[in-house]
Structures are given as C-alpha cells and as structure tokens.
Amino acid sequence: MKILSMVGRTLVRALRFLRRDKKAMVGAIIIFLLALISAFPSWFLPHDPAAEIYQPGAGVSWNHLLGTTSFGQDVFSQVIAGTRESFLIAMIVGALTTIVSVVIGLTAAYSGGLIDDGLSLLTDVVLVIPTFPLIIVITAYVKNASFWMLIFVLVFTGWSYGARQLRVQALSLRNRDYLLAARARGESGFYIVFVELLPPMTSLIVANFLSSALYAVLAASGLQFVGLGNINDQSWGTMLYWAQNNEALATGLPLWALAPGVAIAILGSGLALLNYAFDEVANPALRPVRSRLKVKATAA
Amino acid sequence: MRFLVRRLGFLLVALWAALTVNFFIPRLMPGNPAEAMMARFHGHINPASLNALKVAFGVNTHESLIHAYFSYINNTAHGRLGISLLDFPLPVSTVIMKALPWSLGLVGITTILGFLLGTTIGAIAAWRRGGVLDSVLPPVFIVVSAFPYFWIGLLAVWLFALTLGWFPLLGGYNETTAPALTWGFVGDILDHSVLPAMTILITAIGGWILTMRNNMITVVAEDYVKMARAKGLKPRRILWQYAGRNALLPNLTGFAMSLGFVISGAILVEYVFNYPGVGFMLLQAVESEDYPLMQSLFLLITVAVLVAIFLSDIATAILDPRTRSSG
C-alpha cells in the first residue's frame, strides 16, 4: 500500500510539473502520441507499408500524403510502421542503460575503496573510447545486426556517462545524516540503497534515461542508415538506408529520405525537451527568467 | 604537475584498453568472420604478411592467446597494421595516410570553430539573461540536436547541391582535375568542404552553446562577479575576464565527452558527402570486409580522441591553478 501511495504521489507531482512547464508538456505529448502509434500502428496506417503496388515515385497527394517510393510503397505508411522499432529501441536502451549506470555508479559510490577505484577507472575508460566507431566495428563483424543485437551493443557502449554522474551524486549523499542514521540503525545495504539513497536521485536518473534514449535513437538510426542494422526491418533508419541506396534525393523523391529523419527528430525532440525541463527542475537557476518571476508572484 | 602525470597515466590505460578491445572483438565473434577474409588473401600476399594478419585476427595459429596478444601489441606499436584489402596490396598505414589530412582538416577545423563560436554565443546568451538569444537559442538547439547529423547532411545535399546547385554534390575535390598546389585546386577543396563543414558545425554548436550558457548562469551569480560589478568595471571586462573564463573551465572538461559525439557524427556526415576522410573510409572498409583497415581506423580515431582529451587537460591545467595544486 505504501508503494502504491508513493506511486500515486509521484504521478500527481509529475502532472503538476507538466502543467507548469511548457517544454515538458510538448515533450510529454510527443512521447505519448508516438507510444500510441507504436502500440496500435493499424489505427494510423492508410496503406500496407510493405506493399509495392502503388505508382512508383508518385508525388504528394491525398491518397499518398508523403508520396511513394521508387518501389511503389506508400511513404507515409512506412513512417508510421517504422515508429514502433525506433520507439522501442529508445525506450529499451534508455531503460537498460540507466539500470547498468545506476548499478555501477551506486556500487562504486557505496563500496568506496578499491572497488570504487576500479569501477571509476573502467567508467572513465569506456567514456573516452569513441562509442560510435566501436559500435560500427562490432556490428561489422555481426553483419545485419538484429533488433536485440543493436540494443545489446548500444547498452554495452552507452552506460558510462550516466554511471559517472550517478556516482558523483551518490558520493555527495553518502555522508548525509539520514544515511548515517540508517546505517546506525543497522538497516540492510539493500534497504539503504533502495529506500534511502535512490529516491533523492530520481531526477538525475530520469534525466539519464532520457538522454540515453535520445542517444539510442540517433545511434541506431545512423547504424541502420549505413546498412549495419537488419535492412529488412521496418524502422526509420532502414527507410533512410533504402532511400539513400536508391538515390531518393537525386531522383526527385526527397520526401522518402527526409520524412523518416523528421520522424526521428520528432521523437528526439520529445526526449530532449523533457530532459531539458528536468534540468531546469534540478537547477532552478536555468529556468527562463519570465517564468521564474511568475512563480515568485504567485508564491507571494 | 601531478595532475598532468595522472592524466597521462590515464591516457595510457585508455589506449591499452582500446588495443585490447580491438584484439578481442574479432576473436569473440561467432565463427571468426576474419577467416573468410583470410581465405581471400591466400596466395595474393607474401607469407610473412599473411602470418602477421593471422596473428592479428587469431586465425589458424598455433600460438597461445597470450603470445598472440603481445605480438599484436608489438606489431601495432611499430605501425605494422597489415595489408588493406580495399586498396590491395597497400599497407594499411599508407591507405590511412591518404584519408587522414581530409578528416583532420574538415573535422578538426569545424570542431575548434564550433567550440569557439558556441562558447562565445552561450556566454553572451547567459549574460543578457532573458534577451533574444537567451530565450530563442535553447529551444531551437534542443530541436536541432534531436536531428541525426547525417540527416542534416542529406537536407543540405538536397537543398544546396541538388536543388539550388550552389555547391558540389560529393567528394573532397573535383576528381576530373589532378590534385596540384594551385589556387584553383585549393578553392575547389574549400568549395567541396562548405556543406559538410556547415553540417557538422550546425549540429555540434548547439551543445557548446547550451553548456556554456548553463555554466555562465551559475558563474554570473557568484560573489566575485558581483564584486567586479560593484567596483564599476566595464561590463565587457566582467563578461570575458571574470565570468567567461571561469565558466569555460567545465566546458573544457566537457570537451572530452562531447568530442566522441562530434567524431561519430562526422563519420556519417563524411559518408553522406562521400568525403574522402577517415569516417568514409571506415564505412567503406566495413562494406568490403577489410578488417585490418577497419580496426586500424578504429584505433586511429581512438588515439585522436584521447590525444585531444589530453590537450584539453593541459589547457585546463594552464587555465585553472586549482587542478595544478590539488592531486
């Protein structure tokens, strides 16, 4: 019951936050809409995205909102159908990366000593080795990396920045009185970490999730664009691959290549806007000047 | 000094880690993909080179893993990177040298330019809090940063090269003319670099602006800035000599982290423009399964990033006395 009321309170607070912050509101609406499209693509699909039965290279019309590909597929339907994979990659990589970051960052901060030194060094090394070239090398050997392979590689290379941030924040919390008190009471390490240490770090963890998700969308679509993903998947990145390989730009079908990019950017903007709003919550000095004044006025 | 020694030590550890990863990745892959490549090499290159390749990729050798590991590190340290398949039978190092100047020119200059421009704009935006720059830039660059780098490149190709015809479409120079050190050729190179450079600049600059703005906002509230104001110093002097210098420090450290992103983006931008640099070559190596070239390029990019990070550490040590005194 206690957990339920905690969840309830968090939800109420989140809704209040969204109503107050315009950036967060726009971000949340974007994510909600994309989640809806990913869950029920058939509600939004005017045509079969794979069917190569329409007039190839057709321009924009009511029937084909974004024209057709040179294979005669409907571009708009492909964008809709591609939403699910890109959205899922963002969410799953975001969540898994955050979990790895939390585990490594908190273990380092909480254990201290040699374990901390070792984990911190590992974190810093993974942080400075350029991720994307490494991903390219790994996926080059794997060939046509599947959905789960992409997720594994992105998580494997993407956890370090978050782990470092979380370790620093956990270190600053470590010697606070309420944590010392919990230790003096003889609480278990599990209790201390999950009930005492994690809740005050929520905003940083959420920010971490959002930036990892954004990174995952961009990196995955980049990989798919150069043909290192599974080219038969339905996703925005593979759409870009096919568009590029069939010279969509040069053959007068720019929408084929540009539409999936805009879709990626819409998902990315949603995540980035939420992230930025969270930054402003964590650091009130960053809020726009006018809204700060408004808050003051209503408080007075 | 201790700070720099420690950072140098870290540089070496990171370098060793990259070498080790490079050594083990092909060995960890199911059904060693390098074996297929080796079959294509057979009978084409001399036995010594073939053997070096076998050592590098762990194919059919009777050596122990540890022995192979050390001879691999020894070979790499001496620049013996193997033979390229893409540009057969040139050594990998020769092939890379052809691409390196292009990337150093394009990515190097745009990175430095982006950093300078971004920090300047960010500082001014924070200084005029609530002004036009401060309210317009953050949302604009949040959205820009959500676009894939390469997509901005595609847009630029379509708009400025294909539709308007202002700039050449692909490549680093006009390949019908022979490269020569003439003004015409230099102009041709510049002409070809405008679109890729602008693409990298537009996507990279946002990060610098936002972080500098956020640092600056914190710094402007510090007591010493108020003190400078109270003394009646000129605003311009406070902006650059007092607040700007201190807000820059965390940004220099952040340079290390964002550099990886810039390089990643640049790889795809080079690919979109067929720009003859390291990133485009990396993807070509992937496509033609030229593993020696691919892995050497990965190492090269890693070394470049690590050296750049070390340089930013030196700059931090010079600009911030605190790093020199504390361990």
Image (cartoon, coloured by chain):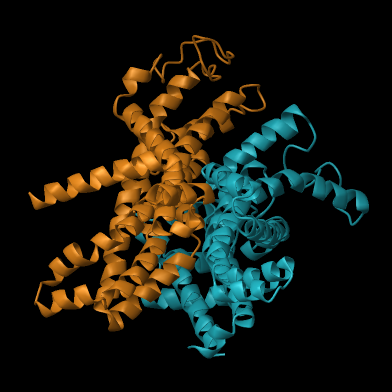
Rendered location of residue B114, percent (x, y): 67, 57
Q: Which chain is orange?
A: A
Is residue B62 visible in the rendered image? The answer is: no
Rendered location of residue A196, percent (x, y): 19, 66
* Relative height, residue B322 to residue B173 (above, below): below
In this orientation, which residue lies closer to the viewer: A21 or B65? A21
* B225 displayed left or right of B66: right
* B196 displayed left or right of B73: right
* Relative height, residue B64 to residue B88 (above, below): below
Is residue A210 visible in the rendered image? The answer is: yes
Q: Residue at x 42, y 39 (%)?
A: A27
Rendered location of residue A110, percent (x, y): 25, 74
* Relative height, residue B133 to residue A36 (above, below): below
Counting the numbered discs, the total is: 0
Q: Which chain is cyan?
A: B
Q: Quadrant of residue A70?
A: top right
Rendered location of residue B215, percent (x, y): 54, 64
Q: Residue at x 64, y 56 (%)?
A: B128
Q: Quadrant of residue B239?
A: bottom right
In this orientation, which residue lies closer to the viewer: B249 or B299? B249
Q: Residue at x 67, y 27 (%)?
A: A250
